[in-house]
Image: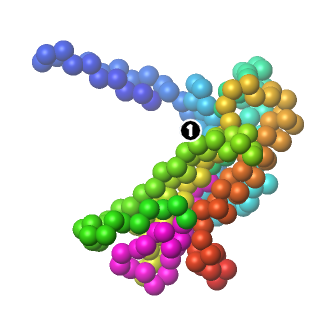
Amino acid sequence: NIVEVELNGSHGRAKSSPFGLRGTSVDLSDVFQLRPNSISLSRLPPYLGWDTLEKNFFSAWGEVVRLSGNIAPSRIGVRYLNRIDIPGVTGPLLPSEYVAGFPDTPAGFPEPTTIQASHLEGVLDRFHCSYMTNVSTVASPLVDHSSLQVDVDVFTQGDLPMKPGLLLDLTRELREAKNYLFEILVTDKAREIFDK
């Protein structure tokens, strides 16, 4: 629901109106959200891979089109939130050792910092899409670890195809763009963690 509150002097009024629907799979791992102008499908651990996510999303999209008629999408995107768990680091973390393009803390700056973040956005001409990346330190759920969150969102807007096959091709190209950016962002030191 969206809740609006209007204040006028000592009097107030609140109004609640439906904004969308949210559903989950029985095991709570798949989350589907339907709003007036968007749909999204998210997967929480355990991850079953791209093929499963793609199949589930296009199944949901097919139902939306079946119930609503031929609606033209205006934006489609692929977004991954990756957490890099760094073992043995419990003190201050140097994110630039694990993620390229992350600014170092200026010399003389008060240490330790509790949260560090980096945001980049722009156009990726090679894949005809736009991107947003957010990298930040996050509290690690693991003992004797520090963690970084690497959020990569690639998307395209405007005149998009309505045919499911063309939309599927576009989604796969966006996934390729996401992988391309992720590989540029992570350093060899981060890859060593992945290989263990």
Looking at the image, the residue that sits furthest to the left is 10
Position above or below: 164 against 119: above
Query: What residue range appears in magenta?
Result: 80-99
Residue 76: x percent and y percent?
Answer: 68, 36
Q: Secondary structure at mark 1?
A: strand
Determine whether, in the image, residue 124 is placed left or right of residue 55.
Answer: left
Q: Residue at x 60, y 26 (%)?
A: 37
- Which image quadrant is residue 1 in? top left
* Residue, disc 1: 22
Determine whether, in the image, residue 84 is placed left or right of residue 124.
Answer: left
Looking at the image, the residue that sits furthest to the front is 107
Is 89 included in the stretch rendered in magenta? yes
Q: Amino acid at mark 1?
A: Arg
Q: Residue at x 78, y 46 (%)?
A: 173
Position above or below: 12 against 153: above
- Say if residue 32 shows up in the picture: no
Packing grade of label 1 (10 A; few <14, some 14-19, many >=20) is: few
Determine whether, in the image, residue 141 is placed left or right of residue 39.
Answer: left
Is 32 included in the stretch rendered in magenta? no
